[in-house]
Amino acid sequence: MKDSWERIELPPSLDAQQINEIVKPAFPNKRVVHSERIGIGLSNFNYKIYLDGSSEPFVFRLYKGSKGIADKEIDIARLVGGRVPTANFVYADTSCSLIDKPWSILEWREGVLLWNVIQTGNLQDIASAATSAGQVLANIHAFTFKDSGFFGEKLKVKDHLKMDGERFLSFIEECLHADCGFWLGEEYTRKVWSFCQTYSSLLTENVESPVLLHSDYNGLNILVQQKAKGYSVSAVLDWEDAFSWNRYADIGNMLRYEEEGSTYETHFIQAYKDEGAVLNDNWKLLSKLEDLVALCDMLNNSTPNTPNRVKDLKGLIVRTVLASN
């Protein structure tokens, strides 16, 4: 699982005093008295901070990328606010004047990671958490766009992309001739290529409006809280990779570790459809194809210094191909 992956870039080591100097503009009359690193975040760095005289914590978030990543997260929070549970932004500074990274302050949302419930909860816990996650994803995908591609300013699609069968095969072939193929080995490289050639036409045949894609919608980026009737999503976190795309990429991401017909898969998909979302009859294959793009891309960008990441990605790719034959 991704929580065991190695970091390519180590998080900065910041204590409360250093964080206090950075966040002064956000809290001019307060002082940070305690901070602790939270989450596994492989892209950005998050700290839980406490201010003097207050028992309410906040999240101090350092962005690894450019100011555009922070701006995108803020714009998405405004777009989906009231319909999708997210942490509200309290303050943001993208000037890089106090530190060489954009940063923000977000409200603290209570909850446990959905992944923990999937791993340790009973069937009732898992079913309720899956139902809530499916409902929330349907609400995210209710936001549609004219074109698919990456966002520019104010969530305007600037880099127009479309993953049809031809582009899919071209991308996978490029990965298989590079490091992805090296890590897979000759036998599984052939199996992956055969699988992709067999089913790639489904991507061309499937014509749907692009939706707001979280792009990392899984148990490590979703907080859930236990209520009287079971678990419900309290916040969807980490929107830095969001873009306008095919809904099946999010579904494939969420279900990549699930066994066929699992309790989680069954309740997640049923809730997604009950919320009004419409799925293609071949939704499982479409989801696997979309997720295979992400898996091959990540394996292609792995190194000998990331053995856990390589092992996990290779296993997921092999399972995807073998389970569908």
Image (spheres, helix red, strand yellow):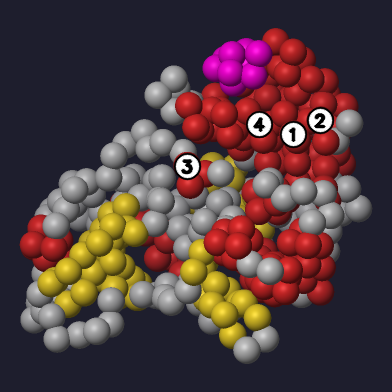
Residue depicted at x 79% and y 56%:
262
Q: Is residue 319 magenta?
A: no
Answer whether labels 4 and 3 touch (C-beta < 8 Å): no
> Does the image show residue 84?
no
Residue 115 is left or right of residue 266, and the answer is: left
Residue depicted at x 91% and y 53%:
281
Q: Main secondary structure of the magenta part?
A: helix
The CA distance from mark 3 to mark 2 is: 24 Å
Pointer 3 residue: 4
Q: Amino acid at mark 4?
A: Gly
The CA distance from mark 1 to mark 3 is: 19 Å
Instruction: Tell me the element at label 4.
Output: helix
The CA distance from mark 2 to mark 4 is: 11 Å
Q: Where's residue 31, x and y in %? A: 10, 75
> Does the image show residue 197?
yes
Location of residue 7 (image quadrant): top left
Location of residue 135 (image quadrant): bottom right
Answer whether labels 2 and 1 touch (C-beta < 8 Å): yes
The CA distance from mark 2 to mark 1 is: 5 Å
Q: N-terminal of the two: label 4 or label 3?
A: 3
Give the residues in magenta: 177-185
Q: Callout 4: 10 Å neighbours few (<14), some, many (20+)?
A: few
Pointer 2 residue: 322
Instruction: Tell me the element at label 2.
Output: helix
Q: Which residue, as the protein is rendered here, is positioned at the far top?
A: 186
The quadrant of the image that shows the N terminus is top right
Q: N-terminal of the two: label 3 or label 2?
A: 3
Pointer 1 residue: 319
